Image (spheres, rainbow, N blue to C red):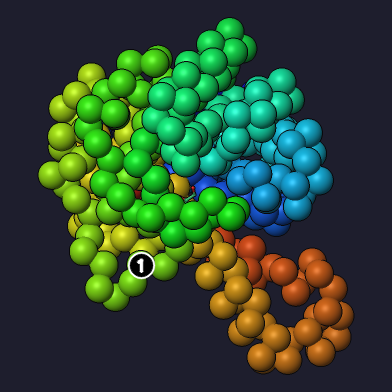
Amino acid sequence: MALVSATEMLKKAREGKYAVGAFNTNNLEWTKAILQGAQESNAPVMIQTSMGAAKYMGGYQVCYDLVKDLIDSMGITVPVALHLDHGEYKDAIECIKVGYTSVMFDGSHLPFDENLAKAKEVVSFAHINGVSVECEVGSIGGEEDGIIGAGELADPNECKLMSDTGIDFLAAGIGNIHGAYPTNWAGLSFETLEAIANVTDGKPLVLHGGSGIPLDQIQTAIAHGVSKINVNTECQEVFAAATRKYIEENKDLQGKGFDPRKLLAPGTQAVVDLVKERIEWFGSKDKA
Ligand code: 13P
């Protein structure tokens, strides 16, 4: 199946009260693992690259070709959107030109008026190319590719103005952060989420920092309009843990255990398993 924009899959998710998993990729193995996990779950999926991960992988064209060619060679039939995660303006434009089917323009660090103006420009260029757009209001805590957010709660009025630009889905800070949650974390603010959902006309909402949020909070967030959940750190953690175990058991020293096809296999399988588990959590299993 050809890559698709995320507009339809997230509209359906919002209406059907489930969320699509948006998993960050870093390389060949992760891309295969995410596609395999989604296919085995019969679920729509978003594969996303941060600007830094795309640079690491050799650029946006490489990422696009990789995902597109793997969909063919692996016989993937579930809907897949290739999304730019936390992109700057010029990166969003470049990704649309390269063939990404979805982009996030993250202007949350800019003055709000500028964030809004740039969002409008991205939307008009994206939509003539059939590409979906995510924008962000109220920065999300933690650190991602050097962009550091303070974990604020988004202002619902600003969310409404951003939603009215014609973006397809909205990321808004509701106490979520990227990376591990501190032990004294207050949890998600459902009051803020509800206030945002009330003024954004049924637009799908995006929950960043999906790693480490307890299942009950994930389910409540979905019930309040969250339709896309971003997961990155948890995939990294399970990959590292499985690789560590393989090496600590000296498996790399036995026979040809040092062959990267063997060395990276347990970590890759761990990502497949996590993707499938999160798809179950998010309710998108069998929603392809
Ligand atoms: P985590 O790394 O906390 O899962 O967050 C991922 C994310 O929100 C990517 O934008």
Percent of width and height locating residue 164: 33, 16
- On screen, residue 162 above or below 255: above
Say whether residue 29 is visible.
yes
Q: Is residue 57 left or right of residue 285?
A: right
Residue drawn at x 69%, y 68% as measured from the top left:
265
Q: Is residue 209 left or right of residue 53?
A: left
40, 142: nearer the viewer: 142
SS state under label 1: loop
Percent of width and height locating residue 173: 32, 45
**Which quadrant is home to the C terminus?**
top left
Q: Which residue position is annotated with label 1? A: 181
- On screen, residue 241 above or below 37: below
Q: Is residue 207 left or right of residue 94?
A: left
Give the number of callouts. Answer: 1
Question: Residue lying furthest top in this view?
Answer: 128
Q: Residues within 10 Å of mark 1 (few under 14, many from 20)?
A: some
Say whether residue 277 is visible.
no
Residue drawn at x 29%, y 29% as measured from the top left:
159
Q: Quadrant of residue 142?
A: bottom left
Q: Quadrant of residue 96?
A: top right
Q: Quadrant of residue 18?
A: top left
Q: Is residue 280 left or right of residue 132?
A: left
224, 161: nearer the viewer: 161
Percent of width and height locating residue 175: 28, 53
Residue type at mark 1: give it. Tyr
72, 177: nearer the viewer: 177
Percent of width and height locating residue 162: 35, 23
**Which quadrant is home to the N terminus?**
top right
Residue drawn at x 40%, y 15% as measured from the top left:
166
- On screen, residue 61 above or below 279: above
Residue drawn at x 39%, y 45% as measured from the top left:
139
